[in-house]
Image (tube, rainbow, N blue to C red):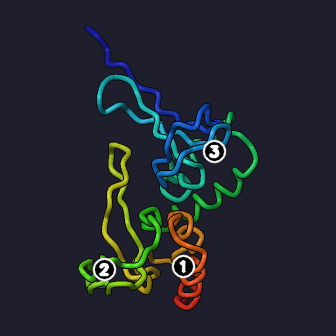
Amino acid sequence: MCAAREVDVAHVLEPATSSRARCRGCGRLIEQGTLRFGERMPNSYGEGEMTLWLHPLCAAYKRPEPLLAALQAPTAAAGELPQLAAIARRTLQHERLTRIDGAERAASGQARCRHCREPIARGSWRVRLVFHDEGGRFNPGGFIHLACASAYFEAPAPLEQLLHFSGELSAGERADLAGLMAGNAP
């Protein structure tokens, strides 16, 4: 009788060996030599396991539990790790914060806010949402009004997290977003 082999799914923090991997959180390349977080999961396409790579900050925002598990390992690299752990713990306090995928201006008036169910007017700011699935992918999950963010997340939406996943915004748009977020603070 053959016993089923268990897959070791320990997560890793290590320097990137090349610049080929894209971050699963933000979609940008992970530069060679920079610290990266690898979330190991059972391979859904065959035997063994697969590693999904993220920037450590993206992991703190979108995959805080596995990141905290990796940070507790004795082989974890030093440096910005205490700051990452603090961000991950803050994100865990309000689980909906892991859904933030950036902010943008609405291209049309067709989308509805997942919080208030009202249409999001064309040209107004909205927050993109994603949901993490069992296969390690982040799937689009709709939008919310910027003004609904605190109520939806049950916490103030962190500006630094919105800006981190809004890499396509210009400096003027970032300043506009920051001003609006300051005006929406409870």
Quarter in which the N terminus is drawn: top left
Query: At 31% from the left edge and 84% from the top edge, which residue is drawn?
Result: 120
At which x and y percent is residue 77?
A: 71, 40
Amino acid carrying mark 2 in the image: Cys
Task: Return the disc, 2 or 1, that comes first in the chain's sequence.
Answer: 2
Count of marks placed on residues: 3
Along the viewing direction, whichever of 90 and 32 lies nearer the viewer: 32
Tell whether 35 sits left or right of 93. Answer: right
The numbered mark at residue 118 is none
Up/down of 26 relative to 33, above or below: below
Amino acid carrying mark 3 in the image: Leu
Along the viewing direction, whichever of 45 and 20 lies nearer the viewer: 20
The numbered mark at residue 71 is 3
Along the viewing direction, whichever of 152 and 169 lies nearer the viewer: 169
Q: CB under 8 Å between callouts 3 and 1?
A: no
Whole-number angstrom distance, CA of label 2 to CA of label 1: 21 Å
Q: Residues within 10 Å of mark 3 (few under 14, many from 20)?
A: many
Tell whether 120 sits left or right of 28. Answer: left
Tell whether 25 sits left or right of 135. Answer: right
Amino acid carrying mark 1 in the image: Glu
Query: Which SS class for mark 3?
Result: helix
The numbered mark at residue 173 is 1
Task: Return the disc, 3 or 1, that comes first in the chain's sequence.
Answer: 3
- Among the 4 quarters of the image, the one containing residue 57: bottom right
At which x and y percent is residue 73?
A: 64, 37
Query: Which SS class for mark 1?
Result: helix
Q: Which residue is mark 2?
A: 113
Along the viewing direction, whichever of 138 and 91 lies nearer the viewer: 138
Q: Nearer the viewer, mark 2 or mark 1?
A: 1
Query: At 49% from the left edge and 52% from the top edge, which residue is drawn?
Result: 63
Q: Residues within 10 Å of mark 1 (few under 14, many from 20)?
A: few
At which x and y percent is residue 133?
A: 33, 50
